[in-house]
Image (spheres, rainbow, N blue to C red):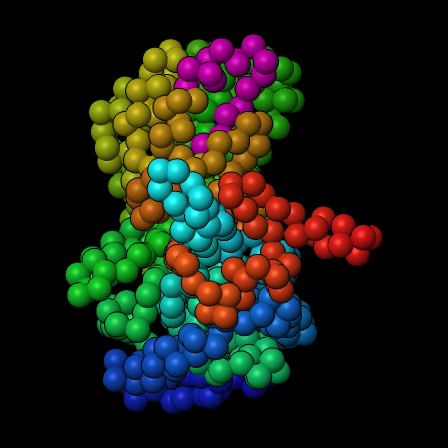
Amino acid sequence: MTLTGHSLIAGRPVPGDGKTTFGVNPASNERLEPEYTLLTEEQLTTATSAAAAAFESFSTLDPATHAGFLDAIADNIDALGDELIIRAGLETGLPAARLQGERARTTGQLRLFANVVRQGDFRGVRIDPALPDRSPVARADIRQRQIPLGPVAVFGASNFPLAFSTAGGDTASALAAGCPVVFKAHNAHPGTGELVGQAIAKAVRDFGLHPGVFSLVYGPGASIGQALVADPTIKAVGFTGSQSAGIALMRTAAARPEPIPVYAEMSSLNPVFVFHGALTGSAEQIDSLAQQYVAAVTGSSGQLCTSPGLLFAPAGEAGDKLAAAVGRAVSACAGQTMLTAGIAGSWNDGAEALGSAENVTVVGRGSAGATENAPAPTIFGTGIADFISNHLLHAEIFGAASLVIRYSTTEELIEAARCMEGQLTSSLQLTEEDYPTAARLLPALEQKVGRIIVNGWPTGVEVGHAMVHGGPFPATSDTRTTSVGTLAINRFLRPVAYQNLPQELLPVALQDDNPWRLNRRMDGIVEDAAAQQKAEANA
């Protein structure tokens, strides 16, 4: 596909009337063609108005058409082939293997949501039939379903140019819910965003949908972002990025005459707790544990939402051996190109601040990478009393840096967990002998994280039905939700009840003959539509 350098509004390339920007290769700081024009706030309303116009028809699509549309987006992204991987690599510095995996995750999400749409449980159909003879008060016929909220604004993430950007994460779940999307492209990878945006627009055209179902806009991050959230046609927001930017969007959304939900994923340290039993093995096993930890810290240059920024290790000889092994492992690591010069600069500032803090030492440091913006990965160390008392040690450093914290008692671990802010994940490295200790810590962790992992690492988030990628503030803005997995669709839906409506006026999903063959909860009892259909066929 040909890159235009323009926003894609309702299926049409639209030059921006504002300033211009370029993608930049972070390995060399060289500009990448083409130049991208930025929309003004006045132009933005064209995209939001188109989304509003598309809502009625898109929100009422039949399941087969709706699911086919999502599958088509995935097919179109796959069809981009190496062109997408090469452009994303140039704009982000990420290796091809990582980007190929991210593409597979993006298309996998779309296909997973397509199956959710076909199956239909997300519609939440509940029917309480009328009981006219019930005493002392008759019951009306009451039916409930989940309906889409309306047009959704989605902001692309810097660190996932595919899986949490144009067609990934929030976009996939919003489209699956039946909500048109106005996508604010991340200016760090504009060409990647445009290629995927064109793939979505093609699916919209091929299925004959209203072109306003999807728009891709480029603009100054702060001003266009705020204008998009403030636009009265937008009914919800999906965001992945910094805490400061997320909070700014939340404030704008709350200050509207009609406040709207903002589902923001922001900062997380993803603490790892190593218990004594995990260190009773051989020297080789301790080395392996250290290498796994360092790999989780340094993978993708540490630019992952779930990168482990904290590791709690026992005081004493066993913990000393682990710390020494961590130092050896990280010293063998070279820096990887970070996403942008700005992110690399922020990492340098954060690492310098942490290294200068009182009672913080360097456990180990690698070497700087050969390209621009590839600082040396560094692991710091401190004691648990300092961690508990000094909140500066709780600051996220976005990149390949982490802090090893030495503890002596279970009580210290519980106190440390309680004093932490909300997190996406927490990992426990343990053996069976550690179960009693872990059992005491778990209640504190449940109040602080969205996902608890045993004998694994937080990086690499499975996309499935049971996954939770969320957590208490500031990990996310709404601890009740997830941005990964099929439950993510619920963020963009709301319940509506229909009382005593005649069949002719009921939505298709609630009609007695169940033309969409949906599973329904009838008077509190789940009715399996597939089983019912099979029984009817065999009758």
Task: Please give the name of the residue rendered at 41% of the width and 19% of the height, measured from the top-left corner.
Answer: 441
Task: Please give the name of the residue rendered at 49% of the width and 11% of the height, measured from the top-left corner.
Answer: 436
The foreground one among 464 and 129 is 129
Q: Position of residue 129 (x, y in %)?
A: 49, 49
**Residue 344 visible to the viewer:** no
Tell whether position 430 is magenta: yes
> What range is drawn magenta here?
426-441
Q: Position of residue 475 (x, y in %)?
A: 35, 44
Q: How would you classify the magenta stretch by its main secondary structure?
A: helix
Q: Position of residue 113 (x, y in %)?
A: 58, 58
Task: Please give the name of the residue rendered at 42% of the width and 83% of the height, measured from the top-left corner.
Answer: 9
The foreground one among 312 and 146 is 146
In the image, residue 116 above or below residue 72: above
The foreground one among 418 and 352 is 418
In the image, residue 263 above or below residue 61: above
Residue at the farthest right position = 538
Residue 156 is drawn in which quadrant? bottom left
Which of the image's four quarters has the N terminus?
bottom right
